[in-house]
Image (cartoon, grey):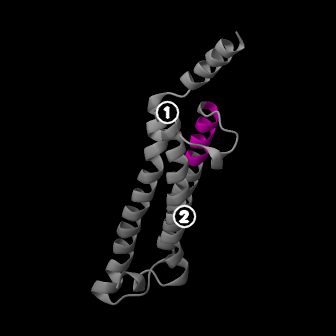
């Protein structure tokens, strides 16, 4: 009798995480990483255009601030997506720790993959942003 009751409670918890939410958690960090790459290319192109064509002064500090703001915003989005995936995994999984997790069903696997993707691409966002603080913006494109 208790096993039926436990099964019913777990099915109620798993229904609270929709498939749409799982797909969003899985893809949102990748979209943030891709968006940062596109923003990096566009901001660098626009900021360095004057220096390349006219030999003008170096890049305006507003370009650095804009790039930092976009990076911080997308990094926060990636981290929040990872936390949301982790909470969904906790609802769907019966494992006590994340290192013992197996992802036995599709929904559990998707939430676990969302955590892994968020973790790795968040580090990618950090690595993409670091050259901005170490190398001049126009020099890193050459």
Q: Is residue 13 left or right of residue 20?
A: right
In percent of width and height, residue 119 lies at 56, 56
User: First in sequence: mark 1 or mark 2?
Assistant: 1
Residue 59, how many percent across, how many down? 44, 80
Res 140 quadrant in image: bottom left
**In front here: 36 or 29?**
29
The residue that label 2 is drawn on is: 123
The stretch in magenta equals 81-91
Residue depicted at x 54% and y 28%: 17
- Distance from the alpha carbon under mark 1 to that under mark 2: 27 Å
In what quadrant of the picture does the N terminus appear?
top right
Look at 51% across and 56% down and name the residue there.
Answer: 74
Q: In the image, residue 139 lies at what x, y percent? A: 41, 86
**Residue 45 belongs to the span the image colors magenta:** no
Q: Is residue 5 above or below residue 94?
A: above
On residue 105, the disc is 1
Please determine whether, in this image, residue 69 is positioned above or below residue 131.
above
């Amino acid at each position: 009798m208790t096993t039926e009751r436990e099964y019913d409670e777990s099915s109620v918890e798993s229904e609270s995480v929709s498939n749409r939410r799982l797909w969003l958690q899985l893809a949102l960090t990748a979209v943030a990483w891709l968006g940062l790459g596109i923003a990096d290319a566009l901001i660098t192109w626009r900021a360095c255009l004057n220096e390349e064509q006219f030999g003008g002064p170096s890049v305006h500090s507003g370009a650095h601030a804009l790039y930092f703001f976009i990076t911080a915003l997308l990094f926060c989005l990636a981290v929040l997506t990872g936390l949301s995936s982790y909470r969904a995994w906790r609802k769907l999984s019966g494992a006590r720790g994340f290192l013992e997790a197996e992802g036995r069903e599709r929904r559990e696997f998707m939430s676990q993959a969302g955590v892994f993707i968020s973790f790795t691409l968040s580090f990618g966002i950090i690595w993409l942003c670091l050259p901005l603080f170490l190398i001049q913006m126009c020099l890193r494109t050459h």
